[in-house]
Amino acid sequence: MKLTDDVLAMPDTDPRDLIVGGSTAKSRMYMSAPMRYLLAHGHLKRARVDTTQPNQMFDCEMLDYGCGRGDDIRDLLQENIKAFGYDPYHIDAKWTLGVKWPLVTCIYVANVLGRKEANSLIGDIQNILRHDGVAFMAIRNDLPELGARGRNCTQTPWKIEFGSRGSSEYHMGQTLYKSPGFYIYKFGKGDKCKVA
């Protein structure tokens, strides 16, 4: 199936039709570790579908922003998660940017961006969140140094700092999860945050 704006604009488009690859994305046989963590610890339960109920209305859908080849989307669909994927370099799915999402994930995208672009990414995600929405961003922390080479690009082990409204000061916010390979940060539409 060829992906076009006409196909992508259809509200009843099957998410499996929206999986497209990315040039820096790693192909995986299994779900990425950050997405496995979010699923196992109930952070994606708002998007779970009860397949025993016919004609079910979805109370939530999620967007994986920067989904690359869509491996996580494929695996989430198998777990009955109503997930859509978007990769700004490999799929022209502008309709996803016009939707206010209750749940957005962004896995290993900020690492391949410069500081300005990574901060724009946070703003882009906040712009597509619903007022009560939540975003989870996973950032690699196992890179040996700033500007490390890998996956056909330069990668940086950013951290996210959080600030208070009306203040110019930032501090290291609480991470949702820390592992030897990545951090997962959680933020909402109104949170003041930036990469550091």
Image (cartoon, grey):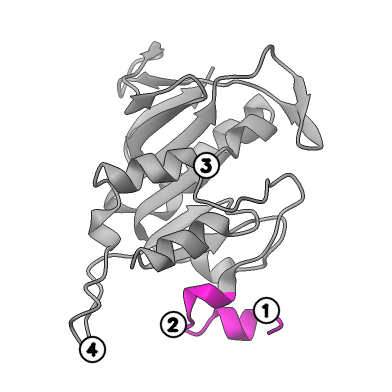
Disc 2 versus disc 1: nearer the observer? 1
The circle on residue 12 is none
Give the secondary structure at mark 1: loop
Please, is residue 3 above or below residue 41 in the view?
Answer: below
Q: Residue at x 25, y 77 (%)?
A: 51
Q: Which residue is mark 3?
A: 107
* Span of residues in magenta: 1-17
Disc 1 versus disc 4: nearer the observer? 4
What is the CA distance from the residue labelled 1 to the residue labelled 4?
A: 26 Å
Cβ atoms under marks 4 and 3 closer than 8 Å: no
Disc 3 versus disc 2: nearer the observer? 3
Quarter of the view holding residue 165: top left
Disc 4 versus disc 2: nearer the observer? 4
Q: Which residue is mark 1?
A: 3
Q: Earlier in the sequence, mark 3 or mark 2?
A: 2
Magenta includes 10? yes
What is the CA distance from the residue labelled 3 to the residue labelled 2?
A: 25 Å
Q: Which residue is mark 4?
A: 55
Q: Earlier in the sequence, mark 1 or mark 3?
A: 1
Q: From the image, which quarter does the C terminus lie in?
A: top right
Give the secondary structure at mark 2: loop
Q: From the image, which quarter does the N terminus lie in?
A: bottom right
What is the CA distance from the residue labelled 4 to the residue labelled 2?
A: 16 Å
